[in-house]
Structure formats: C-alpha cells, structure tokens
C-alpha cells in the first residue's frame, strides 16, 4: 500500500522545488517574501532525519537538498546514504517538501 500522507499536488510540489532552488540566492535578500521562503526551508530542514543521530543528519539533509535540486544527477543510489533505505529516503523527501508547503501556507 502506498503512503499518501505527504503527497502534494503537482503545482504545489513544483512551487516547493522552486522555493528550494532559490534558497541560496534568497538567504541574502531583505525582501519579506524571500525571508519567509528562507525560513520555510530552514524549518523544514530542521525536521529532516530527527530520529537519526546528529552526525547522520547532515548527510541526510545534504542528500535531500541535492536530490530535490537535481534528482537525475543525484538519485538516492549516488548519495552514499547506505544506512537508510531507498523508500525511506523518498518518503522523507515527500515529507520535507510537504513541510515546506505547510510552512508557506500552500499545502
């Protein structure tokens, strides 16, 4: 049975990916909307891998962001996250994007 808990409509998912793609650029912006987007991503990243030890959370977050930015160049198999399963990674990725959408008020 598929896990549909964190499934987003395609347009909302695309918007969350666009927010994530602009994250680095927006971290220096003073515009209120950009600050809101940066905080939405930071809050979502804070919840990624909460149940893993701190030393593993960094690689999980890094891999998740890389995969979201360019999934073809960074599929799960190339991220070096052997301590977690593929389906678990993609379920967490869906939750990460869902958290961004909720933080932005578009979920």
Image (cartoon, grey):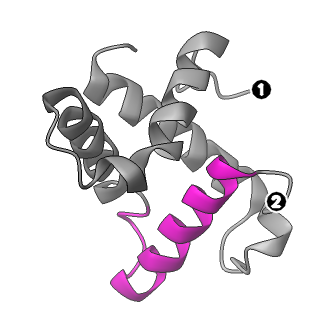
* Residue position for label 2: 75
Q: Quadrant of residue 24?
A: bottom left
For residue 100, above or below residue 76 = above
Is residue 9 in view?
Answer: no
What secondary structure is the magenta-colored segment mainly? helix
Dot 1, how many residues are within 10 Å of its Cα: few (below 14), some (14-19), or many (20+)?
A: few
| Residue 33 forms part of the magenta stretch | no
Q: Which is nearer the eye, 70 or 4?
A: 70
Reading the chain from its start, which is encountered first: label 2 or label 1? 1
Q: Position of residue 63 (x, y in %)?
A: 61, 67
* Residue position for label 1: 1
User: In the picture, which quadrant includes the N terminus?
Assistant: top right
Q: Which is nearer the eye, 56 or 58?
A: 58
For residue 60, above or below residue 86 = below
Q: Position of residue 27 (x, y in %)?
A: 27, 54
Indicate the secondary structure of the residue bearing disc 2: loop
For residue 85, above or below residue 25 = below
User: In the picture, which quadrant includes the C terminus?
Assistant: top left
Q: Position of residue 49 (x, y in %)?
A: 43, 63
Residue at 60% from the left image edge and 12% from the top image edge:
11
Magenta residues, as a range?
49-70
| Residue 62 forms part of the magenta stretch | yes
66 left or right, relative to 18: right
Q: Position of residue 34 (x, y in %)?
A: 26, 35
- Labels in figure, total: 2
Is residue 48 in view?
Answer: yes
Residue 86's disc is: none
Residue at 48% from the left image edge and 65% from the top image edge:
61
47 left or right, relative to 19: left
């Amino acid at each position: 049975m598929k896990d549909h808990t964190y499934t987003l409509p395609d347009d909302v998912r695309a918007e969350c990916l666009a927010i994530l793609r602009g994250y680095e650029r927006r971290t220096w912006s003073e515009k209120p909307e950009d600050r809101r987007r940066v905080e939405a991503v930071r809050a979502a990243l804070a919840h990624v891998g909460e149940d893993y030890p701190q030393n593993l959370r960094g690689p999980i977050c890094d891999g998740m962001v890389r995969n979201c930015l360019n999934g073809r160049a960074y599929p799960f198999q190339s991220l070096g996250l052997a301590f977690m399963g593929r389906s678990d990674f993609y379920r967490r990725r869906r939750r990460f994007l869902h958290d961004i959408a909720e933080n932005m008020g578009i979920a």
